[in-house]
Image (spheres, coloured by chain):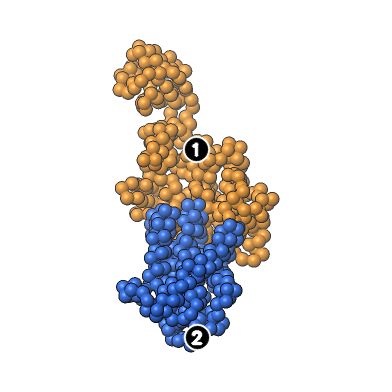
Amino acid sequence: MRNAIEAEGLTKNYGDVRALDGLSFAVEEGTVFGLLGPNGAGKSTTVKVLTTLAHSDEGRASVAGRDVLREPGQVRRSIGVVAQRSGVDRDLTGRENVKLQGHLQGMRGRDLDRRVDQLLEQLGLADAAGRVARTYSGGMQRRLDIAIGLVHRPRVLFLDEPTTGLDPEVRAAMWQEIGRLKTDEGLTILLTTHYMEEADQLASQVAIVDRGRVVAQGSPAELKASLQGEAVHVELDGANVNGNVDAALEGVPGLREVMVEGRALHARVDDGARAVPAVLAALDAHSMPVATVTVARPSLDDVYLRYAGRSFAEADKAEEKEDNE
Amino acid sequence: MTAISDTWALTVRDLLRLWRQPWFIAIVLVQPVIWLLLFGELFQRVVEIPGFEGGDYKQYLVPGVLVMTAFFSSGWNGMSTIEDLERGVTDRLLVTPARRWPLIVGRLGQNAVQVLIQSLVIIGMALAIGVSFEGGVLGVIALVLAGLLLGTAFAALSNALALVARQEESLIGAVTFLQLPLTFLSTAFMQESLIPNWVATAADYNPVNWAIVAGREAVQSGTDWGTVAGYCGLLAAFALACTMLATRAFRAYQSSV
């Protein structure tokens, strides 16, 4: 199997902000590859570099066998891009939007017309094709974005956060469509997402991205299996308890990788059922009341926690705060 | 060939967008008529100033209003580019194999159609209020050409600024800052012999005035075609330079994403 996408040691700075910090990964042809990470991890920047929109400062990348810096024209012919922000022109109809994109991709005449009709039909937009996109719902605009990305029959499709901001039902329909594209059309798909569930469902390979680097890579099953045992999450019912917790839990047997984030406590154990009473007893002995306890098989959340050293939700919040400042 | 065909497809796209904004079209068509009638009335006694040549101010005013209209409406051309940047349309166009210049020239094509229609409205209105174009049809064509070249130049500059500043407020600020001074540092409303020396000097370097002088020379009797061709050549060079600048501005944008 050849690689449809290769990225090696990509770095990119925006002023003082390091968006990519030596990011590397490879995507096999005909597979769905998930780049998973919180907001601001560098996923969108990676997509911009791979789709020739932005230039990396260092490193090299190729898509469909072509170098993105040296042969951007060839790369652009082979790729379809569905950016995080919709690229729909709201003053054009659905059909006009897709047709313009096909034209700029070098398609003409009846071939273009037939392809446009086929895509609009396939994505359930045939009835709305003659309406200006301003009147479309969020889900319809997203499907139109996909039609725009697919019109020239690309070999590699980039989907940057394709379901962010969509209703759960619309998201499920979108997942179905993405699965179909991979199976029926043999497309290579690079999917970025900050929904664990989405990567788990769709991607055969996942790279977890944190602060511009890949911190873990493998199939969702492999990544989860790399974590031994079960995850214990405890929510404490007090003020700031940082510091005391480590001391409190010192004597609990089998407890590993203890991490405290504010009032949340994460750890790994071999046998959850046996460890929980001991954890509760230890916390109780140090007068730390517990609000909730959960024990679970490892999820991709736990994988992220393990490799990024912070929980996904916290990282997401921290980045959003930075974005707002 | 592909690039020319892309340019045309993008011009059609912008014309469709324009066509779907009826209020905007109404304003675009009515405004120049108002300029012509309002200024014609307001300044009608200017002809009585000793030293003013020619007996009818409206006759004098038409080329100025036509060029001013082209200049004013073209300055806003970059607003579509800012909208495209905000809507993600620019990014979508930049990841196609299309060349960069059609993305600018396509937009300039739409602007040229708009300026052409506005010019025809002004000329129609001028004929209706009794203005005669002594330079004949050829003179009128040269006047419209001067307006188109000037409009193209400033529309391209507007797009260049849009790609660099990427903010509506910046573009609005720059356009409103330039519009009135450049219009009044010219012979649009007053003959050169009657304006202060420093204004006349500034007007010599003002592309808006180049278009006005060329257009007025073309529509009067006894046209000196050398003057018309000279100024139109200058305007064409200026428009080309501005278009190249706007195309280069995509690099500035891409290095920021």
> What is the C-alpha distance between the residues marked 2 and 1?
74 Å
Residue closest to the far right: A127
Q: In this rendering, would B224 be left or right of B193? A: right
Q: Is residue B110 visible?
A: no
x then y, percent, for residue A121: 67, 51
State which chain disc 2 sits on: B
Residue appearing at x 66%, y 55% in the figure: A130
Q: Is A232 drawn above or below residue B68 in the view shown? A: above
Colour chain B appears in = blue
Chain identity of mark 1: A
Which is nearer the eye, B246 or A76?
B246
Q: Position of residue B136 (x, y in %)?
A: 55, 83
The residue lying at 37 percent from left, 18 percent from top is: A238
Q: Residue B166's quadrant in the figure?
A: bottom left
Residue shown at 63% from the left, 62% from the top: A112
- Disc number for residue B221: 2
What type is the residue that disc 1 sits on? Answer: Tyr
Can you tell which mark lies on residue B184? none
Mark 2 residue type: Ser
Q: Quadrant of residue B249?
A: bottom left
Q: Residues within 10 Å of mark 1 (few under 14, many from 20)?
A: some
- Density class for disc 2 (Cα within 10 Å; few <14, some 14-19, many ≥20) is few
- Find numbered disc 2 in the image and state the secondary structure of the residue it sits on: loop
Q: Which chain is orange?
A: A
Could you tell me residue A252's position as x and y percent?
36, 17
Which quarter of the rendering shows the C terminus of chain A? top left
- Residue pointed to by mark 1: A195
Question: Which is closer to the viewer, label 2 or label 1?
Answer: 2
Observer-nearest of B117 and A157: B117
